[in-house]
C-alpha cells in the first residue's frame, strides 16, 4: 500500500469553529508532515513528526495544533482560524531520513479548507 | 541557505513533442537529493523522478528524464512524447541527505496543446 489518505476532501468552517483534518498511511513510514499550499504556489512546511514526536514546527500559529496518535495517523486540529488560512492542506510521509538514504515524500490528495 | 529556482513560470508544448523544464539550485552540501514533483489540476502531488547527487548517471523514468549538471547546479526535466495527461504544475525540489525538509522551486505550469 503506497497511499496516503486524507479526510475530509473539502471543509468549510467559520472562524469560531473547531475542526480536525486527518491523515493516514500504512507504508511503515516514520516521518509525517503537514503542509499548507496556496494556489499556484509550492507547499509550505508546517510540521514534521518523526517517530511520533514533533521534530519541526515552522513557527505556525497556535490556532493550528498537530497530533500524532500513532505511527500511521496524523491529525491537524483547527480552532479560531482566519480567512487567510483558507488553502489546500497536504499530508505527506517518508522513511526516516538518514545520511545516504533519499527522503522521498509521498503526498496525500489534500484537504481543501475554506474559512468564512 | 539552499535555494531552488525555476525560471519558467509557464511552458507550453504541442502534444507528442518534447519539452524541457529548467531548475537550478544553490547548495554547499555534497550529500543531497533532487526531485521533480507533478501536481495536476486534481491537486495530488506525485513524484515524477529523483536524482541522488552522488550518482553521475541521469535518472530516467519512461518518458521523463533529467539532465543533472552537478557543477553547474542544474537539474532540468525532459518530457518526451508529451501527452495531455502531462499538463500540470511541475515543482523542482531539493533535500539534504540527512534532512526531512524539501526546498521547493516556485513551479512551472506546463500546458499541452492538442
Image: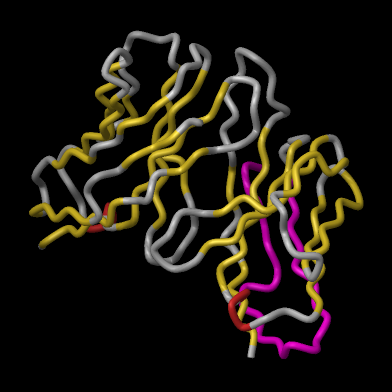
Q: Is residue B17 left or right of residue A47?
A: left
Instruction: Give the magenta range.
Output: A1-25
What is the x, y in percent for residue A55? 80, 39
Residue B62 is a magenta residue: no
Q: Is residue A24 left or right of residue B72?
A: right
Q: Residue at x 69, y 19 (%)?
A: A98
Q: Quadrant of the C terminus of chain A?
A: bottom right
Q: Is residue A11 magenta?
A: yes
The residue located at (61%, 37%) in the rendering is: B101
- Of helix, strand and loop, which mostly describes the magenta segment? strand
Residue closest to the eye, B87 or A49: A49
Q: Quadrant of the N terminus of chain A?
A: top right
Instruction: Name the residue rendered at 27%, 57% in the picture.
Output: B109
The color scheme shown is: secondary structure
- Residue A91, x across and y down, in percent: 65, 54
- From this viewpoint, which residue is outermost toward the front? B1
* A12 or B85, nearer to the observer: A12
| Above or below A8: residue A75 | above
- Displayed quadrant of residue B7: top left
Amino acid at each position: 500500500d503506497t497511499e496516503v489518505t486524507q479526510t475530509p476532501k473539502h471543509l468549510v468552517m467559520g472562524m469560531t469553529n473547531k475542526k480536525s483534518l486527518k491523515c493516514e498511511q500504512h507504508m511503515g513510514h516514520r516521518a509525517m508532515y503537514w503542509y499548507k499550499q496556496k494556489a499556484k504556489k509550492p507547499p509550505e512546511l508546517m510540521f514534521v513528526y518523526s517517530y511520533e514526536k514533533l521534530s519541526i514546527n515552522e513557527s505556525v500559529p497556535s490556532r493550528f495544533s498537530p497530533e500524532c496518535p500513532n505511527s500511521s495517523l496524523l491529525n491537524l486540529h483547527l480552532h479560531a482560524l482566519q480567512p487567510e488560512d483558507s488553502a489546500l492542506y497536504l499530508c505527506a510521509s517518508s522513511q526516516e531520513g538518514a545520511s545516504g538514504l533519499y527522503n522521498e515524500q509521498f503526498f496525500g490528495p489534500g484537504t481543501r479548507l475554506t474559512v468564512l | 541557505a539552499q535555494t531552488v529556482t525555476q525560471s519558467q513560470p509557464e511552458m507550453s508544448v504541442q502534444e507528442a513533442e518534447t519539452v524541457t523544464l529548467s531548475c537550478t539550485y544553490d547548495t554547499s552540501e555534497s550529500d543531497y537529493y533532487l526531485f521533480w514533483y507533478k501536481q495536476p489540476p486534481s491537486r495530488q502531488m506525485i513524484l515524477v523522478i529523483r536524482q541522488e547527487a552522488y550518482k553521475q548517471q541521469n535518472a530516467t523514468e519512461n518518458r521523463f528524464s533529467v539532465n543533472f549538471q552537478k557543477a553547474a547546479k542544474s537539474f532540468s526535466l525532459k518530457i518526451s512524447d508529451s501527452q495531455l495527461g502531462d499538463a500540470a504544475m511541475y515543482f523542482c525540489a531539493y533535500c539534504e541527505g540527512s534532512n526531512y525538509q524539501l526546498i521547493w522551486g516556485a513551479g512551472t505550469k506546463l500546458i499541452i496543446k492538442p
